[in-house]
């Protein structure tokens, strides 16, 4: 739903009227409160200074409530609209940045619109890899965009309204018609790549608004850039972080900009066989009103972490599609969704059902769904001991079951995870399913590992689309 932007002009105009009606007596009373606590004094003094703040794009009710409170004398800082957030480069290690990414609680759904419907049996092949990028309209309408929305490992967006006003919040003031303000929407869309250690950002400035007596502020210079900070020992952030600077009038006629960052692979070491590196990226915006009366102010948007790798084992199942490097948005736990009612996956129905039963049966403690520990991918050549232990424990459990003709023993969690049967805690399930179901599900799992760049020791969940 597109934001109905005239509310900003209407509400701030009402603010001016409110301020104009403030009596000199109430103003004098407020000035006589200097003996109150220091915190209150600092708060009142900040109201006379120009400030820059953000109002969430996709929550009109919250924005309206903020405006109402500004009318009542609250400052943007009191309402939490001002963070004065500016990041500086810092010394960062691979271990530190990997740990930060692992702390994220975000997950995302994987939506696959497959046209193919034929049941291919043993000839089943995974669907082709395709990007599912965020488009501008989808970004500004998404409820998570104001905080940063990761749609999938390769697509991210952030969108907020940015306001510069003098005095801060335009109220209360003894000279209401000297209130000046401008606002605009900044939308940033990031794309990473399966095949390149690269991330690209596109940004757009639109929906520009000014106060009724601030028409000259259309000459305000607005600078937008994407800042980058990588691992100290690596050649990361190879690109141009210089700002795109235009007046608001120029942004109206040319509303977008872009930049690209690359990362060179670090040396292969025993602890970093996949040549992993990380970059933190974030938008920075500066507003410089016309003339010399008001200072330029700068605000940074939220950081997002990009992980690059040069793993060469992801696409061994498909020699025709073999990107040996890639980049993903790392602040998210991926989810391997089972499309239970999609006929394209009919051949593996029994595998889907086994894994669902293992996870959803009453009393189950098997890991792999949200609310329990995630699964952790294990590349067999990096840990053959644990992989073989998984296989051995699975075979021992399967030997106790009756094997129908044409069936194979399927295990969950997968042998390619550290939560497999070999861990020895008994939290696993085995079941005989048709050979075609077992084999094709194995192909689909291998393809998903590759499509989502699930590396050795990466964590993920299982989900069910029904």
Image (cartoon, helix red, strand yellow):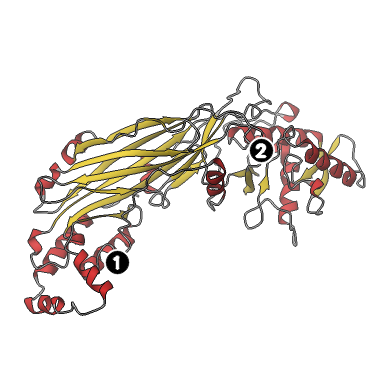
For the residue labelled by badge 2, is the local secondary structure a helix, a strand or a loop?
loop
Which residue: 74% across, 42% down?
414
For the residue labelled by badge 1, is the local secondary structure a helix, a strand or a loop?
loop
Q: Residue furthest top?
A: 320
Q: Nearer the viewer, residue 309 or 347?
A: 309
Q: How many marks?
A: 2
* Cα–Cα span, label 2 and label 1: 46 Å
Residue at the disc numbered 2: 456
Q: Are marks 2 and 1 in contact (CB under 8 Å)?
A: no
Which residue: 53% across, 51% down?
104
**Residue 158: percent from left, percent from top:** 38, 46
- Mark 1 crowdedness (10 Å alpha carbons): few <14, some 14-19, many ≥20: few
Q: Nearer the viewer, residue 10 or 235?
A: 235
Q: In the drawing, does residue 408 fall left or right of residue 122?
A: right
Q: Which mark is residue 62?
A: none
- Mark 2 crowdedness (10 Å alpha carbons): few <14, some 14-19, many ≥20: many
User: Can residue 262 be seen here?
Assistant: yes
Q: Earlier in the sequence, mark 2 or mark 1?
A: 1
Q: Which mark is residue 78?
A: 1
Q: Quadrant of residue 88?
A: top left
Q: In the drawing, does residue 317 fall left or right of residue 401?
A: left
**Residue 366: percent from left, percent from top:** 74, 54
Q: Is residue 338 above or below residue 64?
A: above
Which residue: 21% across, 64% down?
46
Q: Is residue 240 above or below residue 458?
A: above
**Residue 269: percent from left, percent from top:** 63, 31
**Residue 231: percent from left, percent from top:** 49, 38
């Amino acid at each position: 739903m597109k934001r109905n932007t005239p509310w900003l002009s209407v509400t701030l105009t009402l603010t001016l009227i409110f301020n104009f009606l403030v009596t000199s007596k109430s103003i004098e009373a407020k000035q006589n409160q200097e003996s109150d606590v220091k915190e209150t004094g600092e708060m009142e003094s900040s109201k006379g200074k120009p400030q820059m703040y953000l109002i969430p794009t996709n929550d009109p009710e919250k924005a309206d409530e903020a405006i109402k409170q500004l009318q009542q004398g609250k400052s943007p800082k009191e309402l939490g609209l001002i963070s004065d957030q500016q990041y500086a480069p810092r010394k960062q290690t691979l271990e530190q940045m990997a740990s930060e990414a692992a702390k994220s609680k975000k997950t995302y759904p994987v939506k696959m619109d497959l046209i193919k419907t034929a049941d291919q049996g043993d000839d089943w092949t995974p669907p082709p890899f395709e990007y599912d990028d965020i488009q501008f309209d989808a970004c500004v309408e998404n409820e998570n965009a104001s905080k940063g929305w990761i749609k999938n490992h390769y697509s991210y967006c952030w969108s907020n309204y940015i306001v510069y006003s003098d005095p801060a919040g335009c109220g209360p003031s003894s000279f209401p018609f000297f209130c000046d303000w401008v606002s605009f929407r900044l939308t940033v869309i990031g794309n990473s790549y399966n095949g390149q250690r690269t991330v690209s950002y596109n940004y757009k400035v639109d929906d520009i608004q000014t106060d009724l007596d601030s028409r000259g502020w259309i000459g305000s210079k607005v600078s937008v850039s994407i800042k980058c900070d990588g691992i100290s020992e690596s050649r990361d952030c190879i690109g141009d972080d210089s700002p795109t600077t235009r007046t608001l009038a120029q942004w109206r006629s040319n509303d977008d900009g872009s930049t690209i960052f690359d990362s060179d692979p670090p040396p292969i070491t025993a602890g970093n066989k996949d040549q992993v590196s990380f970059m933190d990226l974030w938008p920075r915006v500066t507003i410089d009103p016309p003339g010399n009366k008001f200072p330029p102010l700068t605000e940074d948007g939220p950081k997002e972490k990009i992980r690059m790798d040069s793993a060469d084992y992801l696409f061994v199942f498909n020699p025709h599609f073999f990107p040996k490097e890639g980049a993903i948005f790392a602040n998210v736990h991926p989810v391997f969704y089972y499309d239970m009612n999609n006929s394209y996956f009919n051949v593996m129905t029994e595998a889907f059902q086994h894994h669902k039963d293992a996870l959803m049966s009453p009393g189950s403690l098997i890991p792999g769904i949200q609310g329990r520990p995630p699964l952790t991918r294990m590349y067999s050549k990096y840990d053959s001991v644990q992989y073989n232990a998984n296989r051995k424990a699975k075979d021992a459990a399967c030997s106790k079951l009756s094997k129908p003709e044409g069936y194979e023993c399927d295990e969950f969690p997968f042998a390619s995870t550290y939560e497999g049967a070999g861990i020895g805690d008994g939290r696993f399930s085995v079941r005989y399913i048709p050979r075609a179901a077992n084999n094709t599900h194995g192909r689909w799992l291998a393809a998903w590992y590759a499509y989502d760049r699930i590396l050795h020791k990466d964590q993920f969940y299982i989900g069910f689309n029904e």
